[in-house]
Amino acid sequence: MTSELLNFHHLRYFWAVATDGNLTRTAARLRVSQSALSAQIRQLEAQLGAALFRREARRLVLTETGHVVLGYAEAIFATGHELVATVRSGRPREEVLRIGAVATLSRNFQESFVKPLLAEPHVTLRLVSGATSDLLARLAGHELDLVLANRPVRREAGRPWRSRRVAQQRVSIVGRRRARAFRFPADLGAAPMILPGPDSAIRGEFDALCEQLGVTIAVLAEVDDMATLRLLARDTGADALVPSVVVRDELRSGVLSELCVVPGLFETFHAITVERQFQHPLLKQLLARDGAEILAMDDGGASRRARPR
């Protein structure tokens, strides 16, 4: 056996320890000695030329290479079952890309971002929504491949985040079509408005702009979730401050009109990854596009194959 050929017996033992996290317990379950189990893993590490575990207290924790090897091990051990299923059904194995998006991020933007992969027959998207801190923890733990957010993330010791701005979208005041054109800033404050919540980056900039202009806004509603803000703008008849990508369907159909573009006010969209030796190959395709392409208001269909999680 040459060094290029993998010993699947070693790999099976590694997989057992990686999924259990305890060498002693795994050895007992497999009915082998702990020393024999350790030796098998050391031989695999020597063959690969990289450590697969590091010890934290009494636990074995996977290294980055260990996470990658675990992913391959799970795929390899599933191949026998998939081979039979593929031959019988004629359907090849799917590739999975896991993307997290902060809960306040525009659903339309999320769809536009992943759209190039939706027509790929052998790619499955797993889309996860949540708080930024939770998503970053899952990214660091190799449970996600990418996080979409509307703010960059600062690099931290032990967490070498990479924040890449992938698009920038103008922010508008939208509402029902009216006979007289909206005058900015004269018509600001003339009626109650629906605004993003106080923690929103664009809300902070809008408040600062209104203060500079000496305008006081009567707030009808403050909404963190962009999908809810979209519904309220559509159904209440009140004007709303929103990135135009959020209400692109309503603008296209004429249900809402873009009353004015707020000068100098933008929402930015960021793709956050973490420094890894092994990045998911599908990310390069998604990140190669410019912002105008991502935000294009086309007639694309719904995410027919994306699986919300």
Image (cartoon, helix red, strand yellow):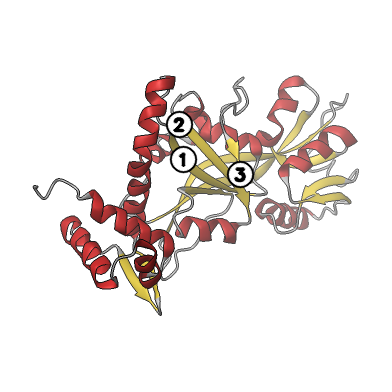
Which mark is first along the chain, 2 or 3? 2
What residue is pinned by disc 3?
309
Which mark is first along the chain, 1 or 3? 1
Which mark is first along the chain, 1 or 2? 1
Mark-to-mark CA distance, 3 and 1: 12 Å
Asked whether the viewer can see residue 92, the reply is: no
Task: Assess whether mark 1 and mark 2 are in contact (beta carbons under 8 angstroms).
Answer: yes
| Label 1 crowd bin: few (<14), some (14–19), many (20+), radius 10 Å | some
Q: Which amino acid type is shown beneath numbered disc 2?
A: Val
Measured from the top left, where is residue 35 in percent x and y? 25, 72
Left or right: residue 270 versus residue 51 is right
Left or right: residue 169 versus residue 162 is right
Mark-to-mark CA distance, 3 and 2: 16 Å
Measured from the top left, where is residue 45 in percent x and y? 21, 61
| Closer-to-camera residue (2/103) | 2
What residue is pinned by disc 1?
97
The C terminus appears in which quarter of the rendering?
top right
Q: Which mark is residue 123?
A: 2
Asked whether the viewer can see residue 10, the reply is: yes
